[in-house]
Amino acid sequence: MDKSNINTIKHALQAGNYAQAISLTKHCLANESEPASIDELYYMLTVAHRLQGQIPQAFDSVQLLIQRQPDYARAHQEKAYLHLAQQQTDHAISSFLTATRLNPALLSSWLQLKSLYQQRNEVPAVDYCVQQIRFLQGLPKAICGARDLMYEGKLFVADNVCRRYLQANKHDAEAMLLLAEIGVRLKVYHDAEFLLASCIELHPDFTKAKIEYIHLLSKLGKFAKAKDVAQTLLDEQTDNRHFLAAKAGAMVGIGETQEAIAIYQSILQQHPTLANIQLMAGHAYKAAGQLDNAINAYRLAYHHKPDSGDAYWSLANTKTYTFTPQELSDMQALATEQKISTEDRIQCLFALGKAFEDRHKYDLSFDYYRMGNELKNTRSRYDKKALEEQIQQQQRVYSKTYFTTQNNGGCQAPDPIFIVGLPRAGSTLLEQILASHSQVDGTMELHNVLSLVSRLGGKKGQYPKIVESLSPDYFEKFGQQYLDETQYYRQGAPFFIDKMPNNFLHIGLIKRILPNAKIIDARREPMACCFSGYKQLFAEGQEFSYNLDNLGHYYQSYLQMMAHWDEVLPGFVLRVQHEELINDLESQVRRLLDFCGLPFEQSCIEFYKTKRNIKTPSSEQVRQPIYTSAMEQWKNYQSHLEALEHYFQA
């Protein structure tokens, strides 16, 4: 869109020429096709109608905007002003609260809420608003503006504003924290981690930075470190439930599940109605295999917070829970409730998809899966071209010639067994089989290889080309560092498993830093694998999975990448076909153990008897003997999967 038109509309609004702004905006909307520009135009149209006193027309445009962008905070703020214009105080408060939840930097919304709560003499609510107003007004103008930009999704602009401020105000605590938060949203995790660690070192009493650091460490799977940071907070405030919960979450990550459950129970004894703690306790119970306790915790969570989509999705994500008719009715009502957050709506829609699948109402089930995926995909940053370029770069750098001439260096330890592939391809089953062996520890999806990629400049385009200029000493150092960092997740066995599926992109790097590691490719029939991924709401990442076309493209890209590794590193990767494993368990298990250099143990056949923490969606399924019911489930939805199926037609 011509930016001059946008500027003309803005100037008209500023000059009070609202009729002109409305006319020009409508003209632009009639000729615009760019989604971002359309959203901006609808916003300006809403403002112009409101300022012109055309409230019904303003309501129409803001409703269209919210339908297009349900997380657009300023749209909800505009809706609140419209409710105020009609003296609908309750609705105004609700919309202002939604706006501040989506963008806590909206000072005008906090000021309006303070005034409205004062009129009602709601003292605690007024006090909270005052606290938020003081915080925002106390920030430097540039940092307050950058925080606003971050919440509005303008991450690169926010990043630039924040960096310019830090150049003139080095070591400013709020600016360092904000830049780290932006880095997390941009998934530049290594930079964010360094910033937070530096911020804490420079400002040891800055509690907010420590809390953000704990969250990031947990996201990166560095749970032992997260636990240590949480403990430093607890040393100062022993009974702070937020710090206790942070510590318990980290403890679940390193396998101290029963101790974590005890902490959650102690919090709930004092605060039994905290839905988020019930959820966290449920996740801990589920990881420990205490399914009945997990289900009870999830049900208590939605009892205390009826709009908790997370509670309903957590029940569905056990894969074995059957919703009651009342729960089904409540979820359907919740899915259409305008006031719930987008995240709760997404979770509810996925749960409904699973609920109706269990009832064999496949068309209705797919409708809910489709709505959930479409809403989730609006937040996705999956970029087909970026993935294709990444694969091409891997192929260029990690060529046959490269491995012929660069075959020395690296850490020689044989400890790691990597399981790679696509999510929902059967990796959890493979891990459970191997972890049932006396010489193998099961861990989780470890982020360490991805963190190394980030440190090598993966987000800045320097990786993988940078590896060509590194000396062999670096690869040995990286390999040893990987072993040191992953030691926290091991229980003393000679070998351990890292089942991060996305590592399939970085097998060349793994070969350089850990040449004696074993790599297993978990392969599943493509339609079954992709549709299983489409049904799954992942905790984070896997952004390709929320669109059928993207799923097909990603699977084909994965095949291309694995074919390259087979060519340049013959014999380094063992492919295990999920369907063959299901149909001939013992032969495939023996093949798997032979590849890993492990003697046969019957416990690997009876893997479902092994007691260990499992935190993936398949946790309950792999605690049961082999079953075949999931192999053909996708065919119940075949009429809806044309966009996916054409990728795999011969």
Image (cartoon, rainbow, N blue to C red):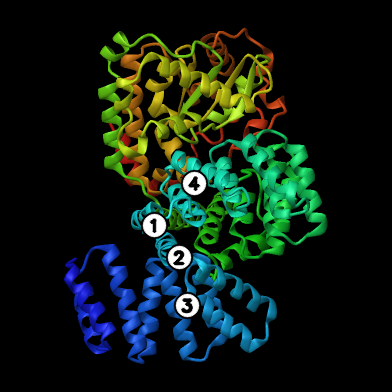
Is residue 526 in view from this perspective? yes
Q: CA distance from mark 3 to mark 1?
A: 23 Å
**Pointer 3 and pointer 1: residues touching (CB < 8 Å)?**
no
Tags 2 and 4 touching, CB below 8 Å:
no
Instruction: Judge by depth and name the residue closer to the eye, 356 or 158.
Output: 158
Pointer 2 residue: 140
* Residue labelled with disc 1: 165
Q: Secondary structure at mark 2?
A: loop
How far separated are the C-alphas under marks 4 and 3? Answer: 40 Å
Q: How far from the left and from the top, in percent, is residue 454?
A: 41, 35
Q: Secondary structure at mark 1?
A: helix
Mark 3 and mark 1 lie on one chain; the one further toward the N terminus is: 3
User: What amino acid type should be assigned to the residue bearing mark 2?
Assistant: Pro
Q: Quadrant of the N terminus?
A: bottom left
* CA distance separating discs 2 and 1: 9 Å
Where is residue 296 drawn, in percent x and y?
A: 75, 51
Identified by mark 1, the residue type is Tyr
Label pair 1/4, CB-CB below 8 angstroms: no
Q: In this rendering, which labeled residue sits more in front, label 2 or label 4?
A: 2
Say which mark, if any, is on residue 535.
4
In the rendered image, the quadrant that contains the C terminus is: top left
